[in-house]
Structures are given as structure tokens and as C-alpha cells.
Amino acid sequence: MKPLSLQPWEILARLRQKQPVVHHLTNWVTIYDCAQVVKVLGGSPVMAHAPEEVAQMTGLAQALVLNIGTLTPDFVAAMLLAAQAAKARGIPVVLDVCGAGATALRDEASQRLLNDARIDIIKGNASEIARVSGLAVQTKGVDAAQVAADLRQIAQNLARQRQAVVVITGAVDIVADAQRLFLVQNGHPLMGQVVGTGCMATSIIGAFAAVEPDLAAAAAGALVCFGVAAELAARENPGPARFKERLFDALYFLDEATVRERMDVEGER
């Protein structure tokens, strides 16, 4: 493995300057946190789900985030309308396959979105990504289950198959496109004790993708910044509630010097 010359702070600076609109059709459990995390980073979140307006709202956005965490068939239909509008405008689409592998409905929704829409970034935990890759694994609700396979290979194979960037979040985050692989080692175990950090990560990826055309670099940079902020928020050993509060503050105050000093990412070509 060799270090990569990522510059997440530069993407973050552009995000704060351009303040992109990031349209979400997302998880009702975590919708506030997804909006807040984009806001503290400098973006402009909008959470519009009605099929009567999703295409028009996507027309105002610089990125589209889809998350099947709280799923209904009507919701998937609205996602497809929004994705069609995103394709027409040429803006990136991020899909969080939240809970894929837990139920047949989630598996069907994931495949329908991947087959019928142009998805630029596919994000999930290990078992979710393994499931949408075609492996016979089952997800624990929306929590990751063990996958007895090479996650890096799964990510890169799916990236090549779908011509998309693939993100697997975990203790070490994996970001793959057809040629490159990034391993992001920033973060803290308390992230796993707060409901919504996975959905927040998806929203941050969407915000970074709104201003960075290299979508693998955007996803890796987003996860670096999120992980660094989590490390800062975890200082002094807070509990989950205080950690979450501090996480938003750490993202808001994040600066280039801190990211440069703490960034822990490797990659290979």
C-alpha cells in the first residue's frame, strides 16, 4: 500500500464556498441529522419526498442522495423520478442501500434502483454491499453482519460491474472505483453507538460529490473529514449523546491544518 495524494481540505473549502444544494430522499429515522450534517459543513440540504415535486427539487440541486432506510414502494418510485431528473442535469446520485439483505423488499428496491437509475456512488456496510453484489449474506436489520470474503475485492468488482464508486463503511472504510482503492482509517468506535452516523456519512459524501467531479476522491475525502471530526468529538471520553453533539461542532470548526495532521488514508492503483 502507498499513501495517496488526497486533499480533503481542498474539497471541504470548495463546499463551504459554493454551498451546494443537496437534495435528499432519505431515512425518516435520521432525516434531521442528515440535514444538519450537510448544513454544518456549509452545504444547503433539502429533504423533499413527494413525487409531485422531487424532479423539480432535483432541478435545483447539485447532488442527489437516496437512502432506503425507511422504505415503501411509493418512496422508491419517487426516488426513480428524482434520479431521472438528476441524470438529465448530469449531477451525481448517491445511493445508500441501507438494510439490503434484511428483507426481500429491500433487496428488490436496491436492484431496481441500481438497474433503472444511473447511480454514481453506491454506499453501505459490509453485508449490504455484499448483498447487492449478489452474495448470499443477511444483514442484521440495518447493522452489518459478518462477510467471509475479501471486502476490497467485492467493492472493486461491484464498481467495475456498475461503473460506479462503491463505499463500504466500517472500522476501516473502503472506497473503490474501477481502477483505485482507498482505505480510510479515520474514525472512532463511538460512531457505532450513535444511530444515524451511517446515514450522515452518505449525506457528507453527497455534499462532497456536489463540488468534486472525481467521485472516488469526493467519497474518500468526505469519510476522512467525518472520521477526523469523530476523533475530535471523542476526546475526553464522552458518552454517545455528548459525542453526537460534539461531532456537529467538530465538523463545523474543521480546518485544513487539523485534517492534514490527522488524515489516515492509504490507497493503491
Image: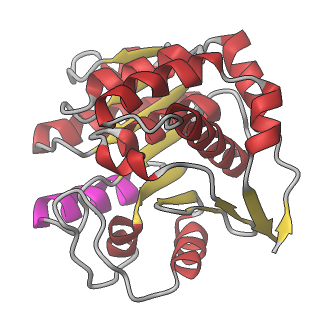
Q: Residue at x 68, y 20 (%)?
A: 15
Q: Nearer the viewer, residue 182 or 212?
A: 182
Q: Residue at x 33, y 52 (%)?
A: 113
Q: Is residue 112 above or below residue 12?
A: below
In-image side of 173 versus 122 (left or right): right
188 drawn magenta: no
In-image side of 168 versus 142 (left or right): right
Q: Is residue 254 above or below residue 102?
A: above
Question: Which quadrant of the figure has residue 261?
Answer: top right
Residue 10 in sight here: no
Q: Nearer the viewer, residue 209 or 38?
A: 38
Q: Nearer the viewer, residue 29 or 229?
A: 229
Residue 187 image offset from top left, x and y in percent:
55, 49
Point out the residue furthest to the front here. 236
Way the structure is coloured: secondary structure
Where is the C terminus found, in terms of image quarters? bottom right
Q: Residue at x 54, y 71 (%)?
A: 155
Point out the residue furthest to the bottom here. 148
115 drawn magenta: yes
**Residue range corresponding to the magenta coloring:** 103-116
User: How many discs mark residues in the rendered view?
Assistant: 0
Residue 107 image offset from top left, x and y in percent:
22, 65
Does the magenta stretch mainly form a helix, a strand or a loop?
A: helix
Q: Is residue 266 above or below residue 130?
A: above
Q: Residue at x 57, y 24 (%)?
A: 251
Residue 73 image offset from top left, x and y in percent:
12, 45
Residue 117 in sight here: yes
Residue 162 image offset from top left, x and y in percent:
52, 65
Where is the N terminus found, in terms of image quarters? bottom right
In-image side of 241 versus 156 (left or right): left
